[in-house]
Amino acid sequence: VQLQASGGGLVQAGDSLRLSCVVSGRTFSSGSVAWFRQRPGKEREFVASSIWTGDNTYTAESVKGRFTISKDNAPKTRYLLMNAVKPEDTAIYYCALALPKTTYSRDYAKQEFYKYWGQGTLVTVSS
């Protein structure tokens, strides 16, 4: 299983951006997918997650109301929709995939919950 994140770039504060995560190899309908980010000088942190089907979404408080994890008809692709971005959203964004686990609702924000990781895509927000 490999994940490829893309869609990052340089944007201005208040802009919108859509990151994509394409999964190659096996996916699991009851597995989960997440986005994490690592801001300059900080630890990697949870952003948003959902079950692969799109259900049971969670979003970090810092981006709630602005960022949404989503899917469309593209196969094996999940997105992070980023609206009203702020300079503090500047980070490398990673997508991650977890195998089906019954502990998703408890552990969705933990990095160790996710087995597969993409390489990251850089988002830079200018003020």
Image: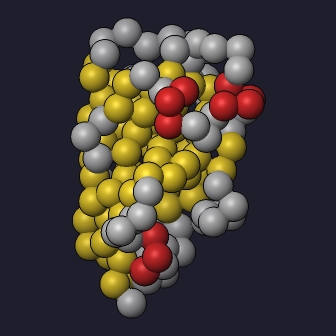
Does 29 sit left or right of 96 as displayed? Answer: right
* In front of the other: 17 or 125: 125
Q: Quadrant of the C terminus?
A: bottom left
Q: Nearer the viewer, residue 113 or 81?
A: 113
State the residue at coordinates (29%, 47%): 120
Quadrant of residue 17 within the rendered picture: bottom left
Q: 20 and 3: which one is in front?
A: 3
Q: Please give the name of the residue rendered at 30% of the width and 35% of the height, measured from the top-left corner.
A: 118
Q: Residue at x 36, y 77 (%)?
A: 125
Question: Residue 4, image x and y in percent?
Answer: 27, 35
Q: How is the image coloured?
A: secondary structure
- The answer to whether residue 116 is above or below residue 89 is above
Answer left or right for 78 relative to 117. right
User: Which image quadrant for residue 126?
Assistant: bottom left
Q: Position of residue 60 (x, y in %)?
A: 64, 55
Looking at the image, can residue 3 be seen?
Answer: yes
Q: Give x and y (percent) for residue 91.
A: 36, 64
Q: Is 93 displayed left or right of 73 in the figure? A: left
